């Protein structure tokens, strides 16, 4: 409710001018950590240092002490009913970018059903990725970012032309949102540039659309439950105008469509809470096969629009306010490949119906020895594992990657 109201309590002291001069609504967050990363079948040179020796598969393993990226977060009100958030974020090397930066006009026409946000913002997701409890390299939401690989180029990450990074990424645009007084009923609708949240208009100048509706309700002896539905409809360029053979940023052409849509539920039973989410995705055959649409009738023989279904179940157990145990299982299943089954792949294998299917597991806990108004500290331990069917570069076998992380996640 506090976030839905634009970081306001709804009284006559919401304007920033009434806040104590010593108060500055900002925080720094970073996670010193130790972690281990493994991959079972990675492409490596047969003879180290000799790129002409051919390629083979090898198991890679690395571990050691490290740092996460850092967030500098400030949010609040510029004046009554004018809210803001700015989030400069760096990766672990200290390279900064703007993860979020927006202004929102709250309670337009005196109604909490009309709030307009402008800038780079997190989509109103069913389960927020930016407030996730998982931190490891393989612990993110696979469903939010899945893109079916072009099976003729299976070893290029996301080997297709769709520039969309996934609904978990912050996007640039406008959001119209509203809610009931107690936030039981909520809606959000966004109009977004089709640039995957990147600045300087790198794509084609088209627009994407996202909508989300949810309803909460009380169940006797169980408390608040929430269900909802969401959908993202977009277009992505299939080729770019060039200069000297180099693509011109922002000169994307031949836009073709894609969508992501689904439903979810958030369920609470005593000290347990369970999130369940389903997503169906579809990309144009041009995007799925990596085919530029600058000439008519040039799709490869048998090309189709790739379709898939995905989702996850995530469980939290809170024995007390300072401890949370978590676990998640996630799966993605291709329902239609971009090419006919049996197509010869670049590694000599044949395309199967389950190529690209993904399974992921996460388990861990967070203990908060420090929880005060000025800061917080959590001891975090987490193990995550992801398997991709048929993704090995030479053998066409399954590729699995795992992460184990323990660290001190703190904000001040």
Image (tube, rainbow, N blue to C red):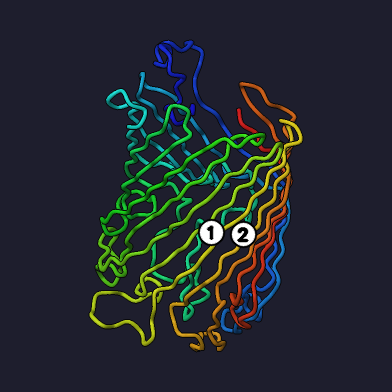
Residue 84 bears which disc, if any? none
Q: Say whether residue 81 is left or right of residue 30.
A: left
Q: Nearer the viewer, residue 333 or 288?
A: 333
* Percent position of residue 322, x then y: 73, 31
Can you identify the residue that label 2 sits on?
A: 330
The secondary element bearing badge 1 is classed as: helix
The residue depicted at 35 percent of the width and 57 percent of the height is: 233
- Category of crowding for the residue at label 2, using alpha-carbon neighbours closer than 10 angstroms: few (below 14), some (14–19), many (at least 20): many
Q: Quadrant of residue 294?
A: bottom left
Q: Is residue 55 above or below residue 249?
A: below
Q: Quadrant of residue 389?
A: bottom right
* Percent position of residue 210, x then y: 37, 50
The residue depicted at 38 percent of the width and 41 percent of the height is: 188
Can you identify the residue that label 1 sits on?
A: 143
Q: Is residue 76 above or below residue 254?
A: above
Q: Say whether residue 173 is left or right of residue 260.
A: left
């Amino acid at each position: 409710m506090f976030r839905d109201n634009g970081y306001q309590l709804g009284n006559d002291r919401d304007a920033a001018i009434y806040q104590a001069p010593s108060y500055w609504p900002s925080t720094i967050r970073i996670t010193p950590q130790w972690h281990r990363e493994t991959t079972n079948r990675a492409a490596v040179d047969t003879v180290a240092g000799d790129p002409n020796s051919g390629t083979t598969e090898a198991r890679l393993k690395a571990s050691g002490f490290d740092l996460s990226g850092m967030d500098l977060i400030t949010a609040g009100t510029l004046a009554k009913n004018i809210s803001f958030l700015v989030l400069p974020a760096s990766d672990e090397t200290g390279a900064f970018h703007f993860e979020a930066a927006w202004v929102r006009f709250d309670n337009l026409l005196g109604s909490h059903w009309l709030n307009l946000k402008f800038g780079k913002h997190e989509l109103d997701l069913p389960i927020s990725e930016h407030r996730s409890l998982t931190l490891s390299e393989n612990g993110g939401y696979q469903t939010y970012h899945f893109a079916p690989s072009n099976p003729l180029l299976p070893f290029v990450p996301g080997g297709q032309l769709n520039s969309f990074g996934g609904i978990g990424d912050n996007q640039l645009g406008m959001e119209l949102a509203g809610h009931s007084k107690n936030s039981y009923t909520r809606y959000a609708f966004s109009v977004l540039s089709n640039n995957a949240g990147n600045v300087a208009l790198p794509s084609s100048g088209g627009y994407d659309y996202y909508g989300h509706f949810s309803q909460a309700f009380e169940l006797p002896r169980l408390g608040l439950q929430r269900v909802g539905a969401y959908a993202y409809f977009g277009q992505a360029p299939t080729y770019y105008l060039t200069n000297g053979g180099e693509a011109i940023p922002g000169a994307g052409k031949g836009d073709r469509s894609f969508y992501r849509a689904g439903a979810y539920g958030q369920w609470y039973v005593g000290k347990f809470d369970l999130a369940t989410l389903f997503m169906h995705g579809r990309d144009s055959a041009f995007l799925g096969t990596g085919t530029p649409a600058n000439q008519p009738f040039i799709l490869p023989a048998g090309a189709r629009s790739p379709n898939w279904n995905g989702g996850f179940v995530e469980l939290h157990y809170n024995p007390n306010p300072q401890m949370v145990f978590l676990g998640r299982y996630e799966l993605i299943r291709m329902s239609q490949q971009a090419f006919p089954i049996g197509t010869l792949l670049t590694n000599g294998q044949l395309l199967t119906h389950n190529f690209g299917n993904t399974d992921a597991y996460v388990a861990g806990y967070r203990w908060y020895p420090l929880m005060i108004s000025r800061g917080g500290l959590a001891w975090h331990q987490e193990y995550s594992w992801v398997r991709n069917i048929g993704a090995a570069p030479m053998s066409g076998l399954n590729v699995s990657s795992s992460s184990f992380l323990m660290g001190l996640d703190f904000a001040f």
